[in-house]
Image (tube, rainbow, N blue to C red):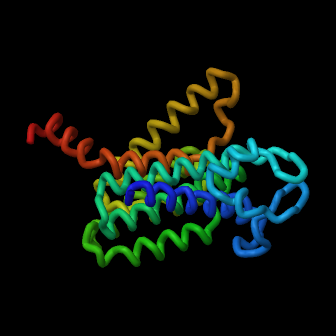
Amino acid sequence: MFQILIGIFGSIIGSFLGLCIARLPKGESIVSPPSHCDACGRRLGAVELIPVAGYLIYRGRCRSCGAPVPWWYTGLELLTAGIYLSLWYRFGPTLVALKYAVLASLLLVIAGIDLRTYMIPDSLVLVGLGCGLLFLPLGEVYWPEALVGAALGGGILFLIAAASRGGMGGGDVKLGLVLGLFLGWQQVLVALFLAILAGALMGVILIALGRKRRRDALPFAPFLTAGTLGALWWGRDIINWYIATFFGL
């Protein structure tokens, strides 16, 4: 039952994250006006606001005007619920799980905005830095490890941005600081490795399909999000495998 409640809570948070992705790039408030149909402006009813179920009941359309509701809202609700459940299984009912749920939620908003606008708002980076500092007293990642992680996370991405001459934006570099602060230096290296690997693979696929050219921009925040989640789930295993393989320890 508790796991079901976590899934429901995750889907509710996912609905709010979708609202943030839709409104923040336009400079709109995330508090008012209440959720409404973008086509006809009608305020959504209680049933329509139920995560996932509301979308299914009305078959993905506005109850009044019949305009289609973007599918990614529901996808984000399901994804957030899945991530919250996975963090519960990984870390149990702990403040560490809460810490990484906050990080994952922030990254989902940043990734969604980056996909839509190719920009990462500085305000969200500042929120991330504040939350990272707030969770440091937990002791799961200690101050020295966090500070070195922030330096590595931001520094490595800065070097890539400088070498690529605009191929990576300053928002990604700032986001690297946040990831290092949350993850520490070992885990952030894993997260960056997975993100770069995933981004390179996706770039090759898109070029092969004719969807992108070599110099076309590719939003990197979604790959940083995926790399971070991968590091949270498998980071320690990857580090242990690396040490055992290359150092025999």
As drawn, the residue found furthest toward the left would be 249
Residue 213 percent location from the top left of the image: 68, 30
**Is residue 134 positioned above or below 141 on the image?**
below
**Is residue 210 positioned above or below 41 on the image?**
above
As drawn, the residue found furthest toward the top would be 208
**Could one spot residue 97 in this view of the protein?**
yes
How many marks can you see? 0
Q: Nearer the viewer, residue 225 or 61?
A: 61
Residue 163 percent location from the top left of the image: 53, 46
Going 30% across and 78% down the picture, which residue do you hit? 137
User: Horizontal placement of 114 versus 93: left or right?
Assistant: right
- Residue 237 falls in image quadrant: top left
Going 19% across and 44% down the picture, which residue do you hit? 240
Going 31% across and 64% down the picture, which residue do you hit? 93
Going 58% across and 49% down the picture, which residue do you hit? 168
- Residue 6 falls in image quadrant: bottom left
Residue 243 percent location from the top left of the image: 17, 42
User: Horizontal placement of 98 versus 68: left or right?
Assistant: left
**Is residue 13 positioned above or below 243 on the image?**
below
**Could one spot residue 170 in this view of the protein?**
no
Q: Nearer the viewer, residue 232 or 95?
A: 95
**Is residue 61 positioned above or below 174 on the image?**
above
Locate the C terminus by quadrant: top left
Locate the N terminus by quadrant: bottom left
Residue 46 percent location from the top left of the image: 71, 63
User: Horizontal placement of 119 versus 177: left or right?
Assistant: right
